[in-house]
Amino acid sequence: MTKNLTTPESHLSGVAIWRRIADAIRLDIVGGKLAQGDRLPPESELAERFSANRHTVRRALAALQAEGVVKTEQGRGSFVDQARRLSYKIGKRTRFSENLAGQADELRSALLSQHLENASAACAAALAIKIGAKVSRLETLSTADGRPVSRATAWIAFRDFPDFAERFAASHSVTATFRELGIADYSRASTKISARHANAEETTMLKLAPGAILLVSEAVDIDPDGKPILYGLSRFPADLLELVV
Amino acid sequence: MTKNLTTPESHLSGVAIWRRIADAIRLDIVGGKLAQGDRLPPESELAERFSANRHTVRRALAALQAEGVVKTEQGRGSFVDQARRLSYKIGKRTRFSENLAGQADELRSALLSQHLENASAACAAALAIKIGAKVSRLETLSTADGRPVSRATAWIAFRDFPDFAERFAASHSVTATFRELGIADYSRASTKISARHANAEETTMLKLAPGAILLVSEAVDIDPDGKPILYGLSRFPADLLELVV
DNA sequence: TCAACTTGTCTAATAAAATAGACAACTTAT
DNA sequence: ATAAGTTGTCTATTTTATTAGACAAGTTGA
């Protein structure tokens, strides 16, 4: 169990004590140490465990309540409200809706925006095209049961698929759009995974507690001939799901 | 480019502005926007970009200098000191030393401690043994060129490999130890990836800036017959490396 | 040499985080 | 009904984070 957040170097962390307490408690919950409906230890006990003041613990619990992870009732205590963490599978065949099917009732993908731009160095390398070549850029947001679970950006070579964006706007499915365009099946060539703090835009779009951590997946999809067709950058709230390889 | 860290809800984040500025700058560096030796914009310009005070930016730069990411010289500016990020490959055959070979000169794994304990629910499920059954628990720390890159915990069923810990202490290699014990080859059955803030112990062992983000990999290795032989929990500094699937 | 630009170091003021204590309000079990 | 245990809400104080301004000290190129 995490303890002693008030070490001499605690002020050097740049992360407030209440947030670190909230992170620690959330970790116990999504990690399975506490199940749905379980009662958390009383505030006084948590304060002692984390060597912090009860008011600081209360702020952590308030943050967790705002996230929907716990629910606090006067005189009774705090209870685990939302315990599960989604699993997002990554493999040769990675498809968003198939992936989370069964773990959530309602899955949606919204196209936030779409425009043409010139390929950056990273994008060009991934798609095996020239730097500066025209690419379609699609910004999407996916939700599971109304809760945002993914904020993704996809790049597709304009030369190869000039009307991908229009078609995607209609179908809202990468798989279906590629199928319309003659790519019966595609697979995942590589995935790089990193993690960082969410920025302001991501915090808003994913409805996160500010300062939340994101899992970032950088992926290249290829057609059956091995030709790169899609370069994608997906951001997932680390609190909400884990990636399964 | 990240901006406007001082939104109305900025104080709700629990992450200090100087730390978010440091994270944003580090992201530009490890993400390749800035190369080794490049000069960063002057402090006054960074302050304007992030809508923060120059002193706040200075604190962010001081943190990055302490991490070894940048180096600041009076009158000249701040320069990128350590730009690369290691890539840790995850696949069917995941071996620590083969993995980082070529990306670093010196790779070491140290056994921090080792003891017997009763299997937790998660551990028992992974190793397909009974809850509470005896398991060897090994705590290790791995370094690349002297810099800690992984803090890992491994569990092995005591019944199947009673002297795994002793042998591992001698060889410091999971692969070699299993080979001695008659497992010619093993492979990765599953990997779950998540991310969270480092706790105090991890901050110390991995020599991190307090509040740093970890990539956490939860893995099960199996022998050629498909029998689970090792359950491992590895923690990697997200600033220092990315996981490649 | 000089001017322009950069980082380093002070002082000061304000905002927010964290601690401390007291007591009210509510729940539960005896 | 009562006592014990819990969360809710005040006030107050201390420590830290952030902003603000001024000027010193170092670097660079004209």
Image (spheres, coloured by chain):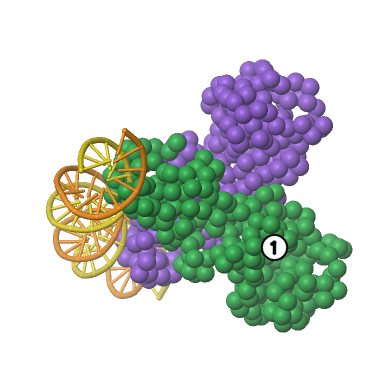
Chain colours: A green, B purple, C orange, D yellow
Q: Is residue A12 left or right of residue B102?
A: left
As displayed, is residue A70 above or below residue A163? above
Residue B217 visible? The answer is: yes
Name the residue beneath numbered marker 1: A96
Residue A130 visible? The answer is: no
Instruction: Report the amino acid beneath label 1.
Output: Phe
Report the chain holding disc 1.
Answer: A
Looking at this view, is C6 or A69 the one in front?
A69
The percent position of residue A1, horizontal first and vertical second, equals 45, 36
x 81%, y 32%: residue: B224
The percent position of residue B133, horizontal first and vertical second, equals 62, 24
Looking at this view, is B225 or B148 the one in front?
B225
x 73%, y 25%: residue: B178
Q: Is residue C17 left or right of residue A189?
A: left
x 69%, y 20%: residue: B159
Answer with the quarter of the image where residue A123 lies. bottom right
